[in-house]
Amino acid sequence: MARYLLRRFVFLLVSLALASVVLFALLRLLPGDPANALTSVGASPEQIAAARHSIGSDQPLPEQFTHWLGQLVSGDLGTSFVSTLPVGPEVASRLDLTIPLTLAAFVLAVLIAVPAGFVAAYKRHTWYGALLSGVSQLGIAVPVFWLGMILVAVFALNAGWLPAGGFPPDGWAVPGEAVRSLVLPVVTIALVMSASLIRYVRSATLDVLGSDYLRTARALGSSFGQAMWRHGLRNASVPVVSVLGIELASTLLGAVVVESVFALPGLGSMLVTGIAQHDYPVVQGVLFVSTLAVLLIGFAADLVQRVIDPRLRDRLSGGTR
Amino acid sequence: MTLLDLSGLTLRTTDGTTLVDDLSLTLAPGERLGLIGESGSGKSLTALAVLGLLPEGITATGSVELAGTQIVGAREEQLTRVRGRDAAVVFQEPLTALDPLMRAGRQLAEPLRRRHGLRGPALKRAVLDALERVRLAEPDRIARSFPHEISGGQRQRVALAMALACEPKLLIADEPTTALDVSVQAEMLDLIDTLVRERDMAVVFVSHDLAVVARIADRAVVMRQGRAVEEGTVLGLVRSPAHAYTRALVGSARRLESALNLGDPR
Amino acid sequence: MTERATGRTTGRPAEPTTGRATEPTTERTTGRRRPVRSYTLLAGCVLAGLIVLLALVSLVWSPYAADDTSGGRLAGPGSGHLLGTDKLGRDLFTQVMTGARIAVEAGLGSVLIAAVLGILLGLLTAFAQGWLDDTLSAFLDILIAFPTLLLAMLIVAAHSATLGSAVLAIGLAQSAVVARLTRILVKRVLTQDYITAARTSGTSWPRTVAQHVLPNIWPTLVVNLALQFGLAVLAEAGLSYLGLGVPPPNASWGGMLQEAQATFTTAPAGALAPGILLVMLVVGVNLIADGLRDTLDPTTRRRRT
């Protein structure tokens, strides 16, 4: 296990390095000079050159890259061209919103999808089992922003129960208001996410229901419930856990759109603004943090799977094959 | 007195295909019956029907009486009580029949716990005993192993130990040696033979292989396309097969055997 | 064997089947196989077909010109405008038809790029060995972990907000998914005996791929590409919603929804119609994918591994 952890950790670092190269290269394809964002329309060439020098975009690319890497290693995400504030603290404060939003939506989605997926599989010949499958089939086709719009129209604009968007300027200092403003975004993400999760849970459950070991347990006198509890749950969770990791990662990043629907000042809106303003350090910083999160979540999902499934432990412990 | 009484058992799929057609047979306590047939003859389904474990979409009509309980149309709770106590099964595929995520010892402990109410160290002891009884060397190691860490033969012994742990009146063996290497096959057959003899257990042995059935069973039913085409003692079937299919079975078994005798000095 | 030590041990598992449940395998029932009749496929074709029809008609005819604002602002449905007008007075039905065309173009274009690039890349990684294989598949894993939309946002930002760059971006992002699927499928086929047989009898690699590998993997690939079509349509709508997709006045459904958001309660038609059509199209192609899976893969044993 220690050996695996080491290998997996090295892989994490290599991936991160690789991702940062890709990020850096991709962003230099952005058209327009970021110095323009700093200067007024009629700026003289001298002013532009000064602006360039101040943000370092007059340096050759490799030098810019090593500079950025050096900053990263020391935990500095750089300074925004536009606001001239450091990116790191800004990202951290945005995460105060994005992390609770993502986690709450994730937990809610799991709470919906696991029972629903099980019922959709176990009761697939009943009308409600079929209905659940049908609803999840429909759910994966609904754009998340449209669902958000509809929920806003129904529960905020018509019923007036919840705010239509925004986040209290004081943030979590007013917890009641903060929570209220996150209810609809959380529900929106959770519904869309659970639609695809239900399909995976259903499929995993069907695998278990048709499995020989479940039949063996029942043939020797276990009731269906006992057999499912002892054998079904763990076996079904193996494929579901890996999907959960990916879903969690994509929710974190996919919050971009939902934050836009609900006008929430999260990581996603920071990214959108950064792109619009050609603010490299902001875009790089946000994407770097997101990449790190995605890789860490993947790492965690792998570990959980290995704890559950002994076959994975053996397969990779013996070095290369 | 009969342990198992099948009369007019018919298995159909929902779209009306008949898989087993009007099958009747009886089995006395301690009796050893072979069910022979090619794949698709309905022999394995018949075995599953005895336990009320038919796959979804297949319905049974007729009567299956196991130790006085009517299986066809029985409620799930009734079936749960019968399974293991009155009849237990060893399936064909030793790899998939065991839970891949659970150590062999824990899987074996479950029927022991349920059947005998054992707990703690007594249960642990019983698990090792049960593994020893199926002639597994290093029962300690096997108990700690996951199914993928042990060989096919060892897995099948664990599965056999689990079935025997229930101390059933009837052991149903559904092609238990088909997936094994030939050398392991013979050992496994001997083992089943010895263990059921010691316990006076009745056996229904399902196989496509006449020679294998002959080793375990006294009596055999030959099935073809869902029907019983011939029934009799194994000896009688081998000596004077009446049905064309039985003759073919016996013929091919003999041909295989005679192939071994080629080099024999006569 | 297909997953390497340095890769994530398990990625996303195989797409779950959504159509009818798979019967547990039993002993072979009868030799006859009933002809496949897939209502799923039929329903999918009808739903998606309606949208495609709308898109095709929009090429030659629409009720109003795209910039005709004679209807007055935010007119309700009826009154010569089937769905009413938007806040500039343009006919909504005309826009919805244009949106259908854009959606279908976005889907087709992205899937075409994803298919060509993805299959080539997948074949390359499948035949690569050692560190090259490790590196390439690790790279794909990272790409796949990012949502299509985010990658697309970056690429669109780097170029400009047009349908072309949106399609290119989505197609590129999706090609990673297709590449990994192809890699897994090809690796699986390559372990089969008939490949060894073909190789030992002296068939060249390109011939082996054409004769044995591609015919064995295309059913799964086609099903996946159909699913990618739906995802591409959704991604394009998302981009347009964020203002990073098709620029006005060419109305994409995503853009229309963004515009109609503010007037949802007063003029709901503009906020509902594009969304409903979008869902119809995506559900339609997903159903086609499910139907194809059932039709192309006649073995009911696909659950067993």
Image (cartoon, coloured by chain):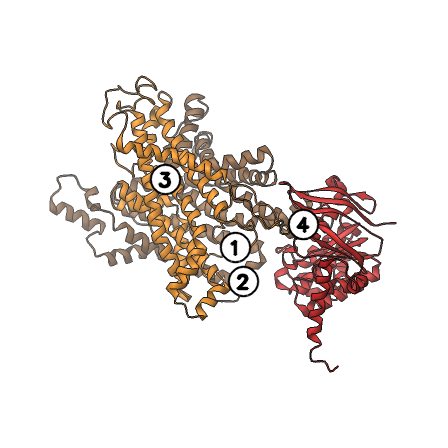
Chain colours: A brown, B red, C orange
Where does the C terminus of chain C fall, quadrant-wise? bottom right
Residue occupying the far bottom of the picture: B265
Q: Secondary structure at mark 4?
A: helix
Residue B26 lies left or right of residue A152; in this view the side is right
Location of mark 3 (residue): C233
Chain for mark 4? Answer: A
Chain for mark 3? Answer: C
Dot in front, 3 or 1: 3
**Residue at screen point 26% across, 32% down:** C60
Dot in front, 4 or 1: 4
Labels 3 and 2 positioned on one and the same chain: no
Chain for mark 1? Answer: A
Q: Is residue B81 above or below residue A3?
A: above
| CA distance for labels 2 and 1 | 14 Å
Residue B116 lies left or right of residue C99; in this view the side is right
Disc 2 marks a residue whose amino acid type is Arg
Q: Nearer the viewer, residue B44 or A5?
A: B44
Q: Nearer the viewer, residue C297 or A254?
A: C297
| CA distance for labels 4 and 1 | 29 Å
Which x, y percent locates residue A23? Answer: 32, 52
Q: Secondary structure at mark 2?
A: helix
Location of mark 1 (residue): A303
Dot in front, 4 or 2: 4
Location of mark 4 (residue): A215
